[in-house]
Image: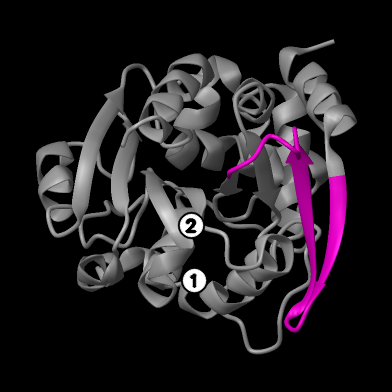
Amino acid sequence: MTRLKQALQEASGRAERIELSTASGMQVWHVWNKDAGHPLVLLHGGSGSWNHWVLNVLPLSEKRAVWALDTPGLGDSELPAGVVDADDLALPVEQGLQGLFKQAPIDLVGFSFGGLIAGFLAAHQPMRIKRLVLVGVPGLGLSNNIPNMRGFRDNMTPEEREAVHKNNLLAIMLHNEDLVSPDMLVMQARNVERDRLRRRRIARSDALLALQSQWQCQVHGIWGEHDALYEGKMPELRQALGQCDLRSFTLIKDAGHWVPYEQADAFNQQLLACLAST
């Protein structure tokens, strides 16, 4: 059994799956160590699901109650009416948080597209978030274009579709080609086919620059040093986060955009350090 398949089985097997009814539709949450107190909420990346965090949830749950959402319109959560992009998702996500935690503040970790949603949520509901951890987040006006991304055609064979998934994982998500296993390609294909948010545009903008002044929580940044979105722009990236209460900014070696997976041990250690800050 491969590492990924084993991790998926263990994480799924030890999770409680919650189908939460909200005004914006049904949301699917997974929780580990539910009764461990102050909630740690994870928002995954675009065209993903909770399994973007597959190598993180169990180690983190040794210290915290870990809640991972399938973002509305992605994974197994329903697409709310009228939702197109990250700015539309702050309200549905807040409805889910309200249903689970009432007014209690949370620690919020957002990876990539999930970080965009977290940024809008922190602006619209500033008292909701105690700590905000941004991981490989776009929307800062600095993201590189990824010219070698490929799309799908209806008449593609399964082998051709698999080749596109592998190309795209290496173009934007991963630095290390050896991590692209058959099990990962299956997981990626399943996530992509459930993506109903196909007109996203905010990631290419500088939307988070204007929102930072509204954040009232402490902020931490964790990036892979080879993140394709910011290759060659890391000094400017830290400066772009200069309008918020940035407590730490960490580059993790030998990792691309999907740093929680590619260097899971280093990421988990750094995230726990951020969450211990006062």
| Residue at point 15%, 54% (across, down) | 240
Q: Are marks 2 and 1 in contact (CB under 8 Å)?
A: yes
| Image position, residue 31 (x, y; %) | 76, 42
Q: Is residue 103 in view?
A: yes
Three-letter code for the amino acid on which mark 2 is drawn = Phe
Res 5 quadrant in image: top right
Name the spot of residue 109 as percent of width and height, x first: 48, 46
By secondary structure, the bulk of the magenta-drawn segment is best described as strand
Q: Position of residue 195 (x, y in %)?
A: 69, 62
Depth check, front residue: 214 or 156: 214
Distance between the Cα atoms at labels 2 and 1?
7 Å
- 38 on left or right of 246: right
**Residue range corresponding to the magenta coloring:** 17-38
Question: Tag 1, which secondary structure?
Answer: helix
Label 2 sits on residue: 113
**Residue that protrudes farthest toward the bottom in the picture:** 82
Q: Is residue 34 magenta?
A: yes
Q: Nearer the viewer, residue 260 or 153?
A: 260
Screen quadrant of the C terminus:
top left
Disc 1 crowd rating (10 Å Cα; few below 14, some 14-19, many 20+) is: many
Of marks 2 and 1, which one's residue comes earlier in the chain? 1
**Which residue is identified by label 1?**
86
**Amino acid under label 1?**
Ala
Vertical side of 141 occupied by 143: above or below: above
